[in-house]
Amino acid sequence: MRKSKSVRERFIESTLTVEEVSTLLGIGVRTVWRWESIQKMPASKSFGHWKRWDKQEIDDWVNSGCPDQREIDIKKKGEQ
């Protein structure tokens, strides 16, 4: 019988570390943290003391040309 995955395991499988995001984007780790703080990129998710980025959100963001998250938030507010 197969044991179901824990919340922690599912979180780890569906997210990226700051190092993985840095490598994927070809930027430094400090730049990832800076971009997150100024809302240039999707926000990280927290699980306990871990901060990681949702893989699908990062893929979608990259595939849409890495738009500034502040612009996306403004557009969303205008649609409401």
Image: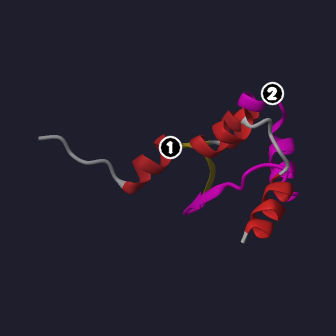
How many neighbours does mark 1 have within 10 angstroms: few (below 14), some (14-19), or many (20 or more)? few
User: Secondary structure beneath disc 1?
Assistant: loop
| 51 sits left or right of 79 in the view | left
The amino acid beneath tag 2 is Gly
User: Secondary structure beneath disc 2?
Assistant: loop
Is residue 44 on the magenta stretch? yes
Is residue 34 on the magenta stretch? yes
Q: Which residues are magenta?
A: 23-49
Report which quarter residue 72 is drawn in. Answer: bottom right
Could you tell me residue 6's position as x and y percent?
A: 34, 53
The residue sitting at 49% across, 45% down in the picture is 12
Report which quarter residue 16 is drawn in. Answer: top right
Number of on-image labels: 2
Locate the C terminus and report the quarter of the image it occupies: bottom right
- Please name whichever residue, 19 or 59, is drawn nearer the observer in this view of the structure: 59
Q: Which mark is residue 6?
A: none
Locate the N terminus and report the quarter of the image it occupies: top left
The residue sitting at 86% across, 56% down in the picture is 71
The residue sitting at 70% across, 37% down in the picture is 21
The amino acid beneath tag 1 is Ser
How far apart are labels 1 and 2 at the CA level?
Answer: 20 Å
The residue singled out by tag 1 in the image is: 14
Could you tell me residue 22's position as x and y percent?
A: 76, 35
| 6 sits left or right of 1 in the view | right
**Residue lying furthest bottom in this view?**
80
Q: Earlier in the sequence, mark 1 or mark 2?
A: 1
The residue singled out by tag 2 in the image is: 26
**Residue lying furthest left in this view?**
1
- Please name whichever residue, 78 or 15, is drawn nearer the observer in this view of the structure: 78
